[in-house]
Image (cartoon, helix red, strand yellow):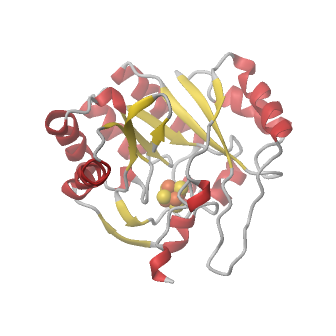
Amino acid sequence: MSFNDRESLSACVSTQVGCAVACTFCATGFLGFTRNLTSQEVVDQIMCIQRESGKRVSNVVYMGQGEPLLNVEEVITSIHTISQSVGIGCRHLTVSTSGIIPGINRLAEEGLPIVLALSLHTPDRKTREEIVPISKKYPLPKLMQALADYAEATKRRVTIEYVLLAGVNDTDEQGRELAQLVRNVPCMINLIPYNPTETPDGVTPYKRPSIRAQQRFKHLAESTGKTVTIRLERGTDIDAACGQLHNTYNK
Ligand code: SF4
């Protein structure tokens, strides 16, 4: 990802080939899980981007294919290598998870000052179990506690990621519930308008809410004083935005 206001790049890296979590809005989830990447394969993605572009990578987000915290030891090793040998400080690294509590606790134990991002996507248990099936294993109250513990251990605010799906998780009630659910977690909330993805049957399962609905939801989510932003999207034009990563060459 490149930005108008700086020369350096942000890299979005994968940690697995495919993913077992099977979120219903995500093209990677449709692939199923193939294998974990090694820490070296994670680092190589950054080296490759720098070599091919001739530009420096200054930020890394672990938001490509895979659930990083289901490959947590390789992810931790890669973070050490990136911060110590590639020269990108931990404060410029973000690890995103669908909510794997043992992995969050393991990261907290390591005490790295990275940013942890939780893909929450709804405060409602039933809806979350439908769109992020692995959440059946990790109940929301325990997950919120794990995030608060993580923030306490690392002294870093967590980011709550929320993909806005029209008519599914963008109701007024869910906006208010979201604000309540995260009120005791040191965090900011990042709303991501849905990027269209096709299932293997050629169906696009969700719709993006209107700008007006996005703004309304933002307003409700702010009601307990958290900072809420709507993410500037990048990569939709080449099917490489959030939730769109899959292996087109397999077709
Ligand atoms: S959103 Fe992330 S965790 Fe969910 S299926 Fe896609 S890659 Fe896996």
Q: Residue at x 28, y 46 (%)?
A: 54
Q: Of residues 119 and 153, which is closer to you in this image?
A: 119
Seen as rendered, the residue at the extreme left is 85
Question: Residue drawn 46% across and 81% down?
Answer: 250
Q: Nearer the viewer, residue 139 or 158?
A: 158
Residue lying at the far top in this picture: please name it.
Answer: 225
* Front position in the image: 139 or 205: 205
The reply, left or right, for residue 8 in relation to residue 215 is: left
Q: Residue at x 73, y 66 (%)?
A: 205
Q: Give residue 136's position: percent from left, percent from top.
A: 57, 56
Q: Residue at x 80, y 47 (%)?
A: 209
Where 73 falls versus 188 (above or below)?
below
State left or right for residue 127 relative to residue 236.
right
Q: Position of residue 3 (x, y in %)?
A: 48, 36
Across and down, in percent, residue 187 comes to: 54, 24
The number of numbered discs placed on residues in the rendered structure image is 0
Q: Where is 122 relative to 126, above or below?
A: above
x and y percent of residue 231 in the render? 62, 37
Say whether residue 239 is left or right of residue 47: right
Q: Quadrant of the N terminus?
A: top left
| Residue 73 vertical placement versus 218 (above, below) | below
Residue 224 horizontal side relative to residue 242, left or right = right
